[in-house]
Image (cartoon, coloured by chain):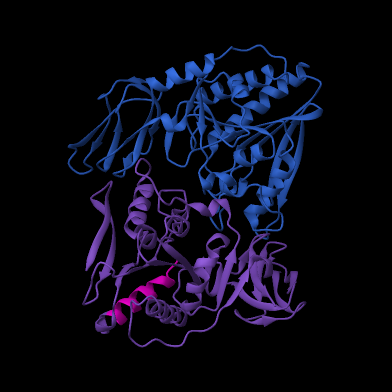
Chain colours: A purple, B blue
Amino acid sequence: MIEDIVSLGLPVDEKIVLRKNRILPECMDENTKRICIVTGTHGDELEGQLVCYEMNRILKENKGHLKGIVDIYPALNPLGIDTITRGIPGFELDMNRIFPGKKQGSMAENIALAVFEDIKGAEVCIDIHASNIFLREIPQIRISEQTAAELVPLAKLLNVDFVWVHSAATVLKSTLAHSLNTVGTKTLVAEMGVGMRITKEYGRQLCDGILSLMQHLGMWDGDVAPVREPIVSTDGRVEFVNAAMGGVFIPAIEHCMHVREGEYIGDIVNPMNGQVLVHITSPCNGLVFTLREYPVVDEGSLIARILGE
Amino acid sequence: MREINLFELKAIYRDSMRIRGYCFGEGEKTLCVVGAMRGNEVQQLYCCSLLVQCLKELEEQGKLVKGKSVLIIPCANTYSMNTGKRFWPTDNSDINRMFPGYDKGETTQRIAAGLFNTIKDYEYGIQFASFYMPGRFTPHVRIMKTGYENVEDAKKFGLPYIILRDPAPYDTTTLNYNWQIWETKAYSLYTQETGRIDKKSAVKVIDSVMRFMERNGIISHSGKSGHVSDVIPEGELLAVATAQSGIFESCVEVENQVKEGHVLARIIHPYNGSVLEEVKATGEGIVFFRHSDPMVYSGTVVFKIIPRSAFRHSKSSRVN
C-alpha cells in the first residue's frame, strides 16, 4: 500500500511527494511490530534502491511468513535522486544534518519533520547509505558510542562485514539516526558500496541481514540465510590515508584486501609529465575497508581507511 | 600594510589556491576579519576590500593605535569563487562547516585548519557571513550563545540589531562557534546581499567595523555614532511561511514597519497570473528578513519579523 507522507508545492506545476510502501502481515494486533527501511536521503547514493526492491519482492512472494509491518521508504530526497545531487536541490544544508526538522523553517526542514514523525515509534529503523562517488566501502553498520550497547547486538544480525562504533561528534546530533535513537526508535545506519552505482552482492547481503533481524524480532518466520560475523571496532583501530598532494590516484590494490605495514597501496601521479608525486604505502597491517574510487585527488583527499589488526 | 600568504594548496591543473591576509599595525593580535568562505559571497569579499582601503588610509595617516595589529582575510576559497560554485568545487563540502579543521584530514578540513591556526589567537574576530536560506537581511550582528558570547562588545558596532542564536548541532563546526570556544570574541556581520554587490549596505557594515575598532582602542577615527543596538534572541523573531508555491512577489522591504494582517507578499500562479496567496504579517513589528528568490516552495519561511514585544524585552535588558 503506497502512502504519501508529505506533499509540498514546487513553484511551477509540480509537487514534491514523499511516499512509502507499507506491507502488512496477514494477521495483526496491537503488539505487531514495525520495521522501517529508509534510503535516498542523499540523492547520489543508490545502493539502497536494490535493497528496497529486493525486500519488496521477497515480502510479496512470501507474504505468509511476514509477522510484522514493513515500511519501505526508497526516496527521502526524490529531487536529489532525480538530479543526481547529494543534497536537496536549492537547499544548502545536508538533509541528514537537519533532523528532526521543524515546522517554521525551509521546505527541507518541513520534509525532515514529516519523515521523523512518520518513522518515530517503529521497533527498528535501517537507514541505508552508500558511500559518495569518491570512495568504495564494504557493507558496514555505523553506530555512535552512546548507542553501542543497545545497537551492536542488532547490527551483528545484519550480515555486514564490519560494525564501526564511532565517537559521538556534536554535528552528528542532527542526523535521522541520532534523532530517532534519541526518542527510543532504534536506528542503525548501513553504509556500503559507492555513490551513483549499485553493487548487487552488497544489496543482497544486506537483505539477508534484514530478514535475519526481522526473524530475531519475531517479524519473519521464513527461511533466513546464515549471517556472517562482523568485525566490531572503535575509532582507535581505524587508520586514515589521505593524499599528501593533489594529482591522479592509481591504486595498486583491490578494495577489501588485507595489507601489511609498508605495503604499496598506489601512486599519486602527474599525467602532464609522467612523474610519481606520492608513492603511498600502508601505515599498518589491516583490512582496507574504504578505498578511493574517483581518481582525481586534492591534497587531503581520502585514499583509504584501514582497520588495523 | 603587509600582504602575507596564510595557506597554499597546490593542484596539478590549476594555479595554487592561496589564502592571503592583509596586516595592519604591529603588536597584540587584536582583530581578525574574514570575508568570503563560499564562492558566491561576493558582497562579503567586497566588504573586505573596502575595509582594506580604509585601514590603508588610516595607517598612512598614523591613526592605527600602537601595539595593536589587525588582519583582514578577504577570501578563503578562491577555487569556488573562480568557478561559480558556492562550496568546494570537487566534493561540494563547506569550509565553514569544517572548523576548527584538521591538518591531516580531508581537503576542506586542511584549509579550515590552515586558516584557523593563524586566526585563533586574536582577541576579536569578525566574519562577514551569509545565510543558508536565500534572502535579504537588515544589517545586523549575530552571536552564537556558547556561554562565551560577549554582547556588550557587540553593541560597539552601533548596528540596529544584535541577534542571539542558540547553536544547532550543525553550527558547532562554524568559524564563529570555534572562535568563541578558543576565547576569541566572535561576531558574524550580515549585510543585505550575498551574490551581488550592494554598496549601501556594505558601507553601513564597514562603518560599523570602524566604530567597533575605534571604541575598542584599535584605531583613532571619528565617524558616525551609529545606533543603540536592540538585542533580540533569534527565537523571538516571528516566522511567516507560505502555504502555496509559485512566483514570489514581495510587497515590503527589510526594515519596513508592518502591522498584523499587512500583506507582505503575493504568491502568483506561474501560468495564469492569479494570486494564489497573500502572505500576511502574523504580528506587528519590523521586517528583518525577506526571501529573495523569484520563486518559492510551499511551507517555506519567507519573512522574519522583529515583533514589538522583542523591543520591550531588549529595552528592559538594557536597563538591567
Q: Is residue A55 magenta?
A: yes
**Horizontal side, residue A118 vs residue A42: left or right:** left
Q: Residue at x 28, y 46 (%)?
A: A11
Q: x, y percentage for residue A241?
A: 69, 67
Q: Residue at x 64, y 42 (%)?
A: B178
Figure quadrant of the N terminus of chain B: top right
- Residue nearest the viewer, comparing A97 with A91: A97
**Horizontal side, residue B27 vs residue A29: left or right:** right
Q: x, y percentage for residue A51?
A: 39, 75
- Report the span colored magenta: A45-59
- Residue nearest the viewer, comparing A293 with A123: A123
Q: Is residue A56 magenta?
A: yes
For residue B144, what is the image quadrant? top right
- Residue nearest the viewer, comparing B239 with B74: B239
Residue B227 visible in the shown view: no
Residue B209 visible in the shown view: yes
**Would you place residue A151 above or below residue B218 in this image?**
below
Q: Residue at x 33, y 54 (%)?
A: A117
**Horizontal side, residue B155 vs residue B240: left or right:** right
**Would you place residue A192 above or below residue A167 in this image?**
below
**Would you place residue A305 above or below residue A61 in this image?**
above
